[in-house]
Image (tube, grey):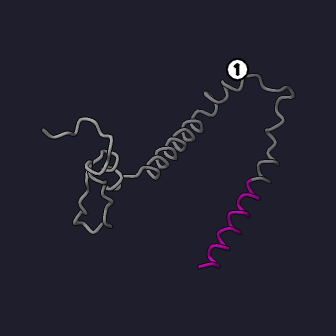
Amino acid sequence: MRALGILARIGVLALVLVLLTETMQFSGWNDSPTAPTSSSFAIAMLDDWNMMTLVLGLLLSMAMIGASYLVRDERLANLTWDLGQDVETPVIGMPPAATRASSINQPGIVGDDEE
């Protein structure tokens, strides 16, 4: 398994080196001797490179959605802790959930007096 990981790293390194050499040898880089202006850059991005801009935007949005999915915490104990409820352990094989102390042991709560 370790050899496969090393082989994959070597393959990725070789691919990056090939892409860099092909990119640097491209003859289209020196078409115009002047630096591009903001408007020419905007026209190039939205006219000449419109599909690449769209694909890049989709990839970035998928990455952000995936990151927000990985960060969220939907464990039953945390959801009910935020709501201030006691939790019973579910039957579906999850680990025991934490329970919040009852309001009797918490001094200073206003409005819980029974008459």
Q: Is residue 85 left or right of residue 74?
A: left
What is the quadrant of residue 93 in the picture? bottom left
Q: Residue furthest top?
A: 39
Percent coordinates x, y for residue 59 in the rendering? 53, 44
The residue depicted at 79 percent of the width and 39 percent of the height is 28
Q: Which residues are magenta?
A: 1-19
Q: Residue furthest right?
A: 33
Q: Is residue 111 above or below residue 43?
A: below
Binning the other alpha carbons within 10 Å of mark 1 as few (below 14), some (14 to 19) or many (20 upward) gives few
The number of numbered badges drawn on the structure is 1
The residue depicted at 36 percent of the width and 52 percent of the height is 78
Q: Is residue 77 above or below residue 60?
A: below
Q: Quadrant of the N terminus?
A: bottom right
Q: Nearer the viewer, residue 24 or 64?
A: 64
Percent coordinates x, y for residue 3 in the rendering? 65, 79
Q: Nearer the viewer, residue 44 or 106?
A: 106
Q: Is residue 27 left or right of residue 113?
A: right
Q: Is residue 88 left or right of residue 17?
A: left
Q: Is residue 60 left or right of residue 99?
A: right
**Amino acid type shown at disc 1:** Ser
| Residue 16 in magenta stretch | yes
Q: Nearer the viewer, residue 56 or 108?
A: 108
Residue at which label 1 appears = 39
| Residue 21 in magenta stretch | no
Name the magenta segment's main secondary structure.
Answer: helix
Q: Callout 1: helix, strand or loop?
A: helix
The residue depicted at 52 percent of the width and 47 percent of the height is 63
What is the quadrant of residue 2 in the picture? bottom right
The residue depicted at 78 percent of the width and 26 percent of the height is 36
Percent coordinates x, y for residue 16 in the rendering? 72, 57
